[in-house]
Image (cartoon, rainbow, N blue to C red):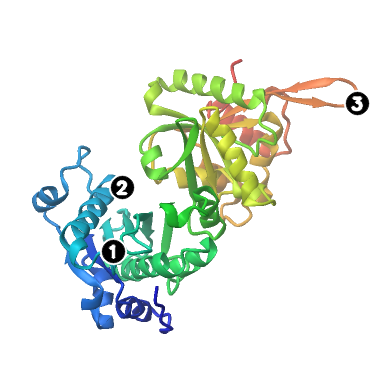
Amino acid sequence: MKTFNEHRSTTGKARSINLNEEIYGTFAEIGAGQEVARHFFQAGLASQTIAKTISAYDMSFSDEIYGKESTGRYVCESRLNKMLDKEYNLLGKRLGTQRGDRSLFFAYANTVTTSSTTGKSCHGWMGVRFQIEPKGPANDIVMHVRMLDKHRLQQQEILGVLGVNLVYAAFFERKNPKKFLDTLVEDIKEGRLAVDLIRFSGPAFEEFDNHIINIELLSRKLSEFAYFVPESNSTSLTYVGDSLFNKSLFIQRGHFSPLNPLHIETLKKGTEQFKNEYKLKNENCLPVFEMTLKDFNKSDSEIVDKIIKLNSQGFQVMVTNFSLFFELKQGLKKYTHSPIAFSISASLVDKIFNPKYYSELSGGLLEGLGRLLDSNTNIYVYPHKNEDKVKLMHLTLKDIKLNEPENKILDYFISLNWIKDFKF
């Protein structure tokens, strides 16, 4: 493939693609204007790159072109995949004979929602399907993103830059995952964008490990969650918002080194107690093993090994960027308003009530606990065996004595039944 040394601005990257006579394809954008295609038109020589642009905003037109969504949701992964399927297949059908032996066909698509309304989610799916050799097989990159700016025009601006970066990285930075991610967020300031998920597939990405790359997103603070579910004796990376949407969650945090029967027993029995107390249906309650990136100092492969092992035993796994429980709770509340429970060892209760962990909050310990606990968010405490010089102690809540005034605060939450013992 020919390459060009254009300045790596957004316009420069778009022009580099336009100058390459092999790269040819379609842009299909729904929900925020044709922000990505616009950069290619403005860069000049767009006729060398763009076969078609389309923006089917009206649902009837969109359904006629891409088919209906059974869920009624149009900002979703299945909609993106239908768009990529339709537009990529049309390129081969209409242009395969004419230029298929000299072109690298691609289809870029996005389906997004933007808003200037406070509190409304501004997010979407985007992806690209492309060849790396004429008449070669297709390769896919699929992403879920959130635009974090308050105003619609700023969100559209970021979407345009990100889309250009994605197409450029697909063709020119696909051999090195870290360089790919560097390019993906080039010219985007920290705090303006979150990439919740990125998934690579196809022969061009045989060396890419989706687990490790999504852990890297966490390390770069581009995402807060990576979510993995069991799938046919394997593991599947999913978008946390789809997995957790309005589900009740029983979360067991740990680094599980190693995973032992007590971890599994605690998760299962705690989930049953949680379901009984809140009268939850099985299908609406998820037991989840959660690991925070803050607990790992070794390579990403260590975390991936644990994910695969837990998934292989049928458990859902969440890796997060949150070191404190109240931060995790606030993150989860973006996706569900149903009850949440955290499972912790009795030996960790003193850490939950240690003021030093809340020093950055203006309200200190009370503010942190207020963000963590409520009638719909409880802590379940399982016994901890602690061997002292005399005997093996079996610690439960009644055995825990904190310093004052923390001990009175603990007693208060116990009286509300927001912190409780496991019922083994």
Which circle, 3 or 2, is nearer the viewer?
A: 2
Q: Which residue is mark 3?
A: 389
- Mark 1 residue crowding within 10 angstroms, few (<14) / some (14–19) / many (20+): many
Residue 116 higher or lower than 282, as above or below: below
Q: Between residues 76 and 393, which one lies in front from this camera angle?
A: 76
The extreme right residue here reads: 389
Among numbered discs 1 and 3, the one appearing first in the sequence: 1
Q: Amino acid at mark 3?
A: Lys
Can residue 102 be seen at all in this image of the molecule?
A: yes
Image disc number at residue 105: 1
Residue on which the image places disc 2: 77
Disc 2 element: helix
Which of discs 1 and 2 lies nearer the camera? The answer is: 1
Give x and y (percent) for residue 205.
46, 55
The outermost residue toward the top is: 424
Asked where in the image residue 96 lies, by quadrant, the reply is bottom left
Residue 59 horizontal side relative to residue 402, left or right: left
Q: Are marks 1 and 3 in contact (CB under 8 Å)?
A: no
